[in-house]
Image (cartoon, rainbow, N blue to C red):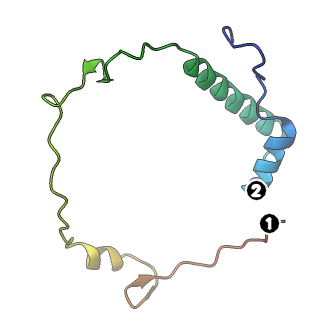
Amino acid sequence: MTGTSPGFDRERITSEIFSHLVELAALELKADEAEYLRHELNGQLNAIHELENIVIDDQLPISSHGVPYHGATAAGLREDVSEPGSLADDILNQAPQLEGRYVVVPDIPHRELE
């Protein structure tokens, strides 16, 4: 990738860091899968870094999809009103197991992190 600034480490996610993240996420990856994903993540981080380096004039007005953004074109704020839904019973009736009005989910096996 061209245009990276001096001192920028293109490999922000090292094999060691990626292995630690894979372990924390309890993923099982083959070596080639892990290296592919690590390479892709580093590519995304490099692209983000290049976007961060784009100089933007402080006087440039905020826009949305290239359209200048100002009060006249912005939708007004709506009142935040809570409206109870009518589908709760239909949704709960689809659950395999209920306790009261709570859905019972199976225990997720886990281990304590060090």
Query: Distance from label 1 to label 2 (Cα)?
Result: 8 Å
Quadrant that contains the N terminus = top right
Q: Give the farthest residue toward the bottom.
A: 100
Which quadrant of the view contains residue 94? Answer: bottom left
Instruction: Bin the neighbour count of mark 2 within 10 Å (Cα to Cα): few under 14, some 14-19, many 20 and up.
Output: few
User: What's the residue at 82%, 49% (across, down)?
Assistant: 20
Question: Which label's residue is closer to the chain start, 1 or 2?
Answer: 2
User: What's the residue at 17%, 68% (across, down)?
Assistant: 83
User: What's the residue at 60%, 18% (across, down)?
Assistant: 50
Q: Amino acid at mark 1?
A: Leu
Q: Nearer the viewer, residue 32 or 45?
A: 45
Tag 1 residue: 113
Q: Amino acid at mark 2?
A: Leu
Which quadrant of the view contains residue 37? Answer: top right
Vertical placement of residue 46 versus 71, above or below: above
- Mark drawn on residue 30: none
Which quadrant of the view contains residue 18? Answer: top right
Quadrant that contains the C terminus = bottom right
Q: Give the farthest residue toward the front.
A: 59
Q: Position of residue 91 (x, y in %)?
A: 32, 73
Whether pointer 1 and pointer 2 mark residues with C-beta atoms closer than 8 Å, the reply is yes
What is the secondary structure assignment of the residue under circle 2? helix
- The answer to whether residue 30 of the structure is visible from this angle is no
Tag 2 residue: 24
Vertical placement of residue 65 versus 82, above or below: above
